[in-house]
Image: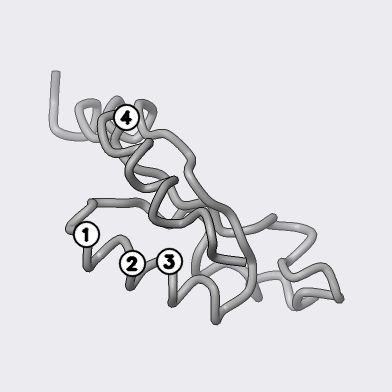
Amino acid sequence: MNKEEHERLDHESLVPVYETGQDGLIAIVKSILDEAQIKYLAEGEGVQDLFGVGVLGTGFNPVTGPVVFKVLPEDADYARQLLKDVK
């Protein structure tokens, strides 16, 4: 298995723990996960304004969807607990 295949499999095993399209909440979630030293992937970040339609009152770009934070399965419960009050 080459490095690219290994990374793809790693990404496929990640578990979603939080989603939002609001920049302020994205920053807060990153800060909480970083402080807890939980590795994460913020899927969809950076493409929110890619298609030029903005967030149109939905809190996220309707074309690309919200940013989804994903973590390793063994960190999922702890991450959800840390993020449960972030709204």
Q: In this view, does 56 lie above or below 69?
A: below
**Of the residues shown, which amino acid type is indicated by label 1?**
Ala
- Res 34 → quadrant: bottom left
Query: Contact, CB < 8 Å: mark 2 with mark 1?
Result: yes
Secondary element under disc 4, as helix, strand or loop, is helix
Query: Contact, CB < 8 Å: mark 2 with mark 3?
Result: yes
Residue for badge 4: 73
Residue for badge 1: 36
Residue visible at 13% across and 26% down in the picture: 2
Query: Which residue lies most toward the left here?
Result: 2
**Of the residues shown, which amino acid type is indicated by label 4?**
Pro
**Of the residues shown, which amino acid type is indicated by label 3?**
Val
**Residue 5 position within the rendered picture, expressed as x and y whole percent measured from the top left:** 24, 26
Residue for badge 2: 32
Distance Cα–Cα, label 1 vs label 4 = 15 Å
Secondary element under disc 1, as helix, strand or loop, is loop
Residue placed most toward the observer, 13 or 4 = 13
Density class for disc 4 (Cα within 10 Å; few <14, some 14-19, many ≥20) is some
Q: Which of marks 2 and 4 is nearer the N terminus?
A: 2
**Of the residues shown, which amino acid type is indicated by label 2?**
Ile
Q: In this view, does 17 lie above or below 66?
A: above
Residue visible at 50% across and 65% down in the picture: 45
Locate the C terminus and report the quarter of the image it occupies: bottom right
Residue placed most toward the observer, 14 or 64 = 14
Q: Earlier in the sequence, mark 1 or mark 3?
A: 3
- Res 63 → quadrant: bottom right
Q: Earlier in the sequence, mark 1 or mark 4?
A: 1
Residue for badge 3: 29
Distance Cα–Cα, label 2 vs label 3 = 5 Å
